[in-house]
Image (cartoon, grey):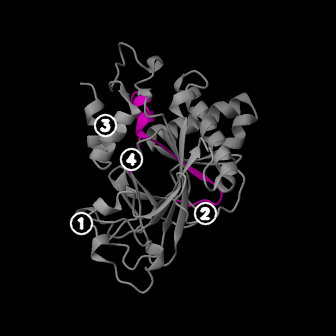
Amino acid sequence: METLVSSWFKDQSLPENYVFPPETRPGEAIVPVSKNIPIIDLGKSVVGHDHRNNTVQQILNAAQKFGFFQVNNHGVSERQNDYSKDPRKGCSLYTSSYNYDNEEIHFWRDNLRHPSHPLDEVIHRDVVGTYSVEVRSLSLRILDLICEGLGLQPGYFGDEFTNVQLLLVNHYPPCPNPSLTLGLSKHSDPNLITILLQGEVNGLQVFKDGQWIGVEPLPSAFVDNIGYQFQVISNGKLRSAEHRAVTNSRNARTTIVTFINPSFSRIIEPAKALVNECKPPLYRAFRYGEFLNTYKAVKGDTEAALKPYKLD
């Protein structure tokens, strides 16, 4: 395993293999924090029909306009999460990405990857188990609210749509020159939906209307974003937004990300209820595993990832 950035970043200049090409550098990494990305109180979805309908519409509007939103009063307990450096049994700790040896440019981050559903007999099960179960419950709750807004049957995203869950812990140490590198480059998520606990340090940015905007860190709130699979299933009603992670020179930033994924063999296609003569399908049917191969081949390029699956 390559040496973690966390072990050598102090008193170092930025190594050449962490410097991004000029066209992809963040430049001024600090951008305005947007107050427009919706913050939705999920507690109101259980106190009455009108409140629930309002919550459904807030989530749907956010998913259509931004592809991102934040939720509070979500029911996930606050807890301290500790992780050890043991790569056995499905858990792995690495720097930059799993593809480090083949990268020309590295990301300024260290990363722990852990399967979190099904848990099975994996290392750290006791540590991440309760957290993962609660976040899974939150994600299914949000999916049901979106289903309601789209007019899909409750529980539409059960079974093979959501049966693979991955937990990722990203640690971004202070960086000697944040304007030249990235913690994570511009991309859209390949999965169904992503749930992020981003901590209290700025770093998440969303590309909206031709510019980067910061997502305000809110204590105990979760950031939710729509993945490519949801864009396809919704027949383009919802959007998977491009986003990135920038660094800073003063404060370390640690985020906990939960990816909700279909099984590799699951057929992905626009939901039948969202397709008719007036609204024909925008995408052909494909297996999720097929899409992942495309996504990896094009290195997350937003236009190229979905292009083979678009219908004329």
From mark 1 to mark 2, how far is it between C-alphas?
33 Å
- Residue 256 falls in which quadrant of the image? bottom right
Disc 3 marks a residue whose amino acid type is: Leu
* Mark identifier at residue 83: 2
Q: Nearer the viewer, mark 3 or mark 2?
A: 2
Viewport quadrant of the C terminus: top left
- The span shown in magenta is 216-242
Query: Which of disc 2 and disc 3 is earlier in sequence?
Result: 2
Q: Nearer the viewer, mark 4 or mark 2?
A: 2
Q: Is residue 137 magenta?
A: no
* Mark identifier at residue 306: 3
Query: Which of disc 4 and disc 3 is earlier in sequence?
Result: 4
From mark 4 to mark 2, how far is it between C-alphas?
27 Å
Q: Are marks 3 and 4 in contact (CB under 8 Å)?
A: no
Query: Which of disc 2 and disc 4 is earlier in sequence?
Result: 2
Disc 4 marks a residue whose amino acid type is: Ser
Q: Are marks 1 and 2 in contact (CB under 8 Å)?
A: no
* Mark identifier at residue 21: 1
| Residue 277 position within the rendered picture, expressed as x and y whole percent measured from the top left | 35, 12
Residue lying farthest top?
277
| Residue 107 position within the rendered picture, expressed as x and y whole percent measured from the top left | 37, 65
Task: Evaluate whether residue 234 shows in this view.
Answer: no
Residue lying farthest right?
47
> Above or below — where is 249 with respect to 2?
below
> Above or below — where is 236 with respect to 281?
below
* Mark identifier at residue 188: 4
Viewport quadrant of the N terminus: bottom left
Q: Are marks 3 and 2 in contact (CB under 8 Å)?
A: no
Circle 1 packing at 10 Å, graded few (<14), some (14-19), many (20+), is few
From mark 4 to mark 1, how far is it between C-alphas?
20 Å
Query: Which of disc 2 and disc 1 is earlier in sequence?
Result: 1
